[in-house]
Amino acid sequence: MPSGFENRYLISTLSGDLLNTDPAVYHLSSLIAGVMSEKKEGDMHTSVTEAGAPPENLQESVAPAARCFDALAAEHHLDDEKIRSVLTKYLQEQELKPFQAELIHLQQYLEDTGRRMIILFEGRDAAGKGGTIRSVTRYMNEKHYRVIAMGKPTEEQRSQWFFQKYVSQFPRGGEIAIFDRSWYNRAMVEPVFGFCTEQEYNNFMRGVIGFEKDLVRQGTILVKLYFSVTKEVQKKRFNRRKHDPLRQWKLSEVDVQAQERWDDFDKVKYEMLRNTHTAAAPWTVIRSANKHLARLNALKVILNAVDYEAINQELDYVPDDEIVVSGAREIELMQKDKLHKKKKKS
């Protein structure tokens, strides 16, 4: 374990009061600074500030705390790599917090004005939708939002207008409805796995544009997020689910086939974006290979979707254009990729 007090760096998110009252924080500062100096571009964005020398009596008071930490680290077999991982996660959580606080103010604005908001989370399996939803809702007022994850349709729902089961979950005034997958199941999963007929698929693609346009025209704020992940990253995440007992419940038969049907999903994704990216209800694509950056930028996109007065004017609300791509731009990139593959075959 690193020790000593030669390092004068502290993470900017740790307050001066914490430094003075918790000597163990200073004991770990050299390790934290090491994490920051060795970080790879894009891993973390938390700044580091130079701090003054510790109080004269700090070295004496830190010894018991340091020994306690070292004992715990030894007991749990925490090497430097594991500690760096824990600290990285902590710093990433700190970076999200100011934006999560703004979401609370956004909620208050919706409640005060009686406006409704719907956020769709779409994307391939293991693209990071669930984790991002948890980051979005972590500190929100639970009385004014709902997360909806629709299961397999019942026989009654099958006999109804397709959108009816979703409309029944729409928000009231002042509420946010978050769909963990949405009516776009009919544009993605269902046609790939044969869960709908060709006619049902075509009817959906013709009807969804007018449905969403009317929704927005009547005052609902609609945000459509598509989380994009590479085939390699998806495979890695599936393997983790397979071998991690805490994640095995996430792995379904559909997931197992997702890799085999990658190209099929590419085709329906392209058609979905090409046909349903509109001025009234545009798609925003979020590159989610880096989960933290995907979550951070998703928060920014959501905050930018509502015309409210931000409380924290010092935050950078501009999404990273390496992470966030408009639906129109994604269509262009997919078209170029299709042409490139076609030329390689010929």
Image: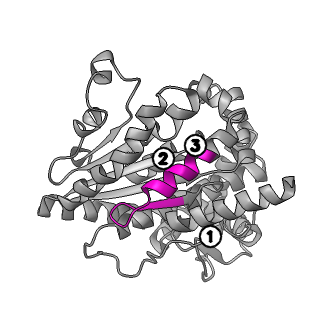
**68 with respect to 308 (left or right):** right
> Which kind of residue does numbered mark 2 sit on?
Glu
Question: Which residue sits at x=46%, y=55%?
Answer: 275
Q: Earlier in the sequence, mark 2 or mark 1?
A: 2
Q: Which mark is residue 30?
A: none
Is 307 or 27 nearer to us in this picture?
A: 307
State how the image is colored: one colour
Is residue 31 rendered magenta in the image? Answer: no
The residue carrying mark 1 is 322
Q: Position of residue 329 (x, y in %)?
A: 56, 68
- What is the span of residues highlighted in magenta in the rendered image? 267-285
Position in image of residue 26 (x %, y %): 62, 67
Q: Give the image quarter of residue 92.
A: bottom right
| In this view, 287 is above or below 315 | above
Question: For numbered disc 2, what is the local secondary structure?
Answer: strand
- The residue labelled by disc 3 is 124
Instruction: State the residue at coordinates (21%, 46%).
Output: 171
